[in-house]
Amino acid sequence: MKDEKLAVFVDALSNYFETTTDTAANVGTPFLINNINDYLDDFTGIIGISGNHKGSVFYSTPKRKAMQLLAEMGLMTTMDSKLMDLVGEVCNTIAGNARRDFGEDFILSVPLLLQGKGSDIAVSNVTSIYIIPIVWKGTKSHLIINLEED
Amino acid sequence: MKFMVVDDSEVIREKISNVLNDEEFEIVGTAKNGEEAVKQFTELQPRVLTMDITMPKMDGIETIKRIIGIDDTVRILVVSALSDKATLIKAMHLGASGFLCKPFSDLDLAEAIDELIEDLV
């Protein structure tokens, strides 16, 4: 995927935190990595992409940040199932918003949800893996983009 | 006014229900996919629905088609992250009455619903 298209995801992330919470997030500059597993945290949502792009979009966050985010939405809980549902929804929203730029052939799967660090995830090593760091209320989470254009 | 929330995310179902569960609205049902929504719609007969698009089993586009086929006077607000024009046009063509793009604030939702039911109240 061309580097300039990453701006679509950076903008979607900024908009997500601005709209959903009262505190803007500091969305960092995307960078390339080799091993996706180093960036997976307590909860991870994955959206599979097909159509005019192929690959996946991941959103991974520590439990504390997921709880804070949910609380900002007026929903207080420590239930893991609800926190996982939230990360799936964040990932789905960011990927869904990208359709504004990538068109209706940017097709999204329903979210796949993972719990726990150190998961042994394998992704395409032909395609670049980009990380976009997000710091919100002092806690870091990551959006991970592994997409190739068809 | 009877209201139903359709979304595969429990968090979103709860958020929408919390914002709208006041004197004006009665949340009569929530559904996590289109199949559940169609089944509950016949039984509960809500006047207004919010509808996600990307859902397992039956997506929002097919669900709108089926629900409008049962009652074409129902008001449907699509609440989806899919922000491309083609999805919006498809949903409106099938009978949806409004579109709210995720992410949304409580105020965004309240305003979209007010606009949706303006002539019903």
Image (cartoon, rainbow, N blue to C red):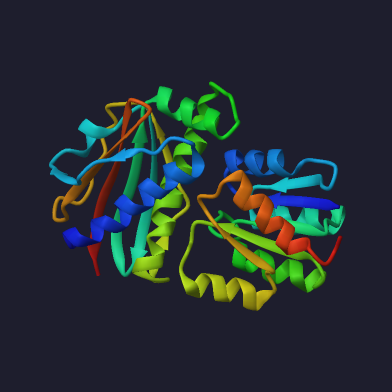
Q: Residue at x 35, y 67 (%)?
A: A101
**Residue A48 to residue B65: above or below:** above
Name the residue nearer the viewer: A126 or B101: B101
Name the residue nearer the viewer: A32 or B118: B118
> Taking the image as drawn, is residue A7 in sight?
yes
Image label count? 0
> Taking the image as drawn, is residue A112 in sight?
no
Relative placement, left or right, of B115 versus A141 is right
Counting from the top left corner in percent of width and height, residue B27 is at 79, 45
Name the residue nearer the viewer: A99 or B59: A99
Counting from the top left corner in percent of width and height, residue B38 is at 74, 59
Counting from the top left corner in percent of width and height, residue A27 is at 29, 42
Q: Quadrant of the N terminus of chain A?
A: bottom left
Relative placement, left or right, of B84 versus A6 is right
Q: Quadrant of residue B68?
A: bottom right
Counting from the top left corner in percent of width and height, residue A26 is at 30, 38
Q: Quadrant of the C terminus of chain A?
A: bottom left
Q: Quadrant of residue B67?
A: bottom right
Q: Quadrant of residue A105?
A: bottom left
Q: Residue at x 86, y 60 (%)?
A: B121
Q: Residue at x 51, y 37 (%)?
A: A85
